Amino acid sequence: MNNHEYDPSGEFTLTGISGSPGICIGKAYLVDREGVDVIEKYFVGQHEVNTEINRFKSAVKHARDELSAIIEDIPEELRENTYILETHLLLHKDKMLYDRTMEIIKKDQVNAEWALKRATALAVNMFKQISDPYLGARAADIEHVSDRIMRQLTGIRDVNISNIDKRVILVATHLTPAETSQIQLNRIMGFVTDRGGKASHTSIVARALDIPSVLGLETATSVIKNDDVIIVDGNKGTVIVNPSEETLIDYSDLRRRYALHRADIVRTGDLPAESTDGLVFRVMGNIELPEEIVGVRDNGGEGIGLFRTEFLYIARTNFPEEQELFEQYRETVELMAPHPVTIRTLDINGDKEIPSMPTPEEVNPALGLRAIRFCLRKPDIFTTQLRAILRAAAHGTIRLLLPMISGCEEISESIRLLDKAAESLEKEGIEYNRDIEIGIMIEVPSAAILADAMAEMVDFFSIGTNDLVQYTLALDRANPHVAHLYSPLHPAVIRLIRHIVDSAREKNKPTYICGEMAADPINLPVILGLGIEELSMAPQSIPEIKNMIRRISVADTGRLMVDVLKKNTVSEIHELIKNRFGDILYSDIYAS
Ligand code: PEP
Ligand code: MG
């Protein structure tokens, strides 16, 4: 999915996937780490050995100075987390890395980069063979240190997003969700990447930050140069490089119109989402960190439908303690009162690794030890979180949500651990509330198929369409090469959702939706027509969706579904929706 249109003025357009909406115009800032992986070996000869050794020594010195400066800059209150970096500082001179690299340069008469790569591989392999998890984790430390030295040797800049001090647009091969969440809004206007897809966690974080982004461009880092002027159109998923005077004027105007359109919609955010035939829907926000609650409130969100708690674990090197989690959750429920907060238990791995738990090597992490599977294998980590949730539930309305459920045993085992956590709190005389609703994410086809049995075990379902589409259609949600096939309007997905909602309804249980499907206006008639009762999405999308619900008749969406369910292709379903609801779904700023 890529497209370059060249223009004689030097302007050209790249087409990718819209990561988050909005338009920004600014200078490109390239961040690239990929070069570190492509290290060439060459022989230097006896006479150059000393030069290589000196190059290596000087790279180590600079890498250490750089790291010391980073440690210095860490604010006092975060100092307790710097011990890992202090360890890295020592590792720069570790025998296995430092001495061995120099030995290899001397013995093999090779360039410093190659010798460092070799020494690193040997050290990492040695650590990986040790079964002790603490020593095993040292392999990752060695890799970090080696990367830092390698960047000095090769001159490739680090992706240290928090250090960027100009107003720029980031251009990167790939940004992890953790890197994206370090973006400082007063500096970075938007970002574009070669990799990633619409439902990737990187784009979810971008939407939460409310900055435009385009992903899956494939060649952005090769064709865009530092300081090129670029226009990022996150609505369309395009990037215009070196725009002509005329394009700049057009886009400045478009950016203004888009800002006005957003302001109009946001003004009505607090009005209830009541359809033209009188049904009221609760529209809630998805958050990754408690700080985002402000965004939910400002955009008229009526609670948190999905709190992705793993982000509290991502940007750090140790697991949070129960007290810290409790305080975060309590703050969240108190800020959101009287509305409910749906706390999803840890959903790590897949595309969200956490530094405190180096992941086992998995060929298919999306099918691996992710989410509830990880928690049930690590009951201590899970119980710490469950205890914190139960304690916070004494301070406001909490719903508990279990991710990636694929079998009934996972539900009963989780409830058993929850009861055990409540018992231990009771014994210790700590305040808690066990009287909370328990729901499961339906995001794996097996859970959808077993929805009737699962509905008996829980209080509600929340459909995670990002994963449900991925697993139903066998499409990696972050892979740009298959992004054109990824659609929640696929007839198989729609039929599966119908089965989920109907099964829950038979047991008098409600079904909610919290995947990205809920935030895209084109899907709204289907969501309402299928009987979903509550929607949760990135806070910035709430006003637009509430506004649309106010213009839709649910009876009409029911009629639409009769026809949708007879269609067998995405394009036919798309057409049907556009024909019946097109006039209310689009306020086309591009047409004016
Ligand atoms: C989903 O899968 O739709 C979902 C909401 O969870 P996440 O995006 O965090 O995987
Ligand atoms: Mg999911």
Image (spheres, rainbow, N blue to C red):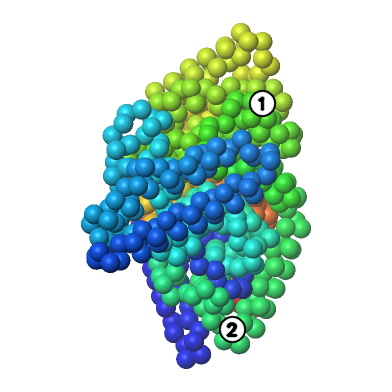
477 over 587 or under it: above or below: above
Q: Nearer the viewer, residue 453 or 366?
A: 366
Specify the amino acid type for callout 2: Thr
| Residue underneath mark 2 | 247
User: Does residue 569 appear in the picture of this structure?
Assistant: no
Q: Residue 123: x, y in percent?
A: 32, 42
- Determine the CA span between mark 2 and mark 1: 52 Å
107 over 408 or under it: above or below: below
Badge 2: residue crowd in 10 Å (few <14, some 14–19, many ≥20): some
Task: Name which quarter of the figure residue 78 lies in.
Answer: top right
520 over 372 or under it: above or below: below
Mark 1 Cβ inside 8 Å of ligand 1? no
User: Does residue 338 appear in the picture of this structure?
Assistant: yes
Task: Name which quarter of the figure residue 303 lies in.
Answer: top right
> In the displayed structure, does residue 168 sit left or right of residue 35?
right
Q: Secondary structure at mark 2?
A: helix
> In the displayed structure, does residue 534 sit left or right of residue 123?
right
Q: Nearer the viewer, residue 319 or 461?
A: 319
| Residue underneath mark 1 | 392
Q: Nearer the viewer, residue 561 or 240?
A: 240
Specify the amino acid type for callout 1: Ala
Badge 1: residue crowd in 10 Å (few <14, some 14–19, many ≥20): many
**Which residue is at 40% across, 60% downward?**
54
Q: Residue 549: x, y in percent?
A: 64, 53
Q: Secondary structure at mark 1?
A: helix
Residue 587, disc? none
Quadrant of the frame with the N terminus: bottom left
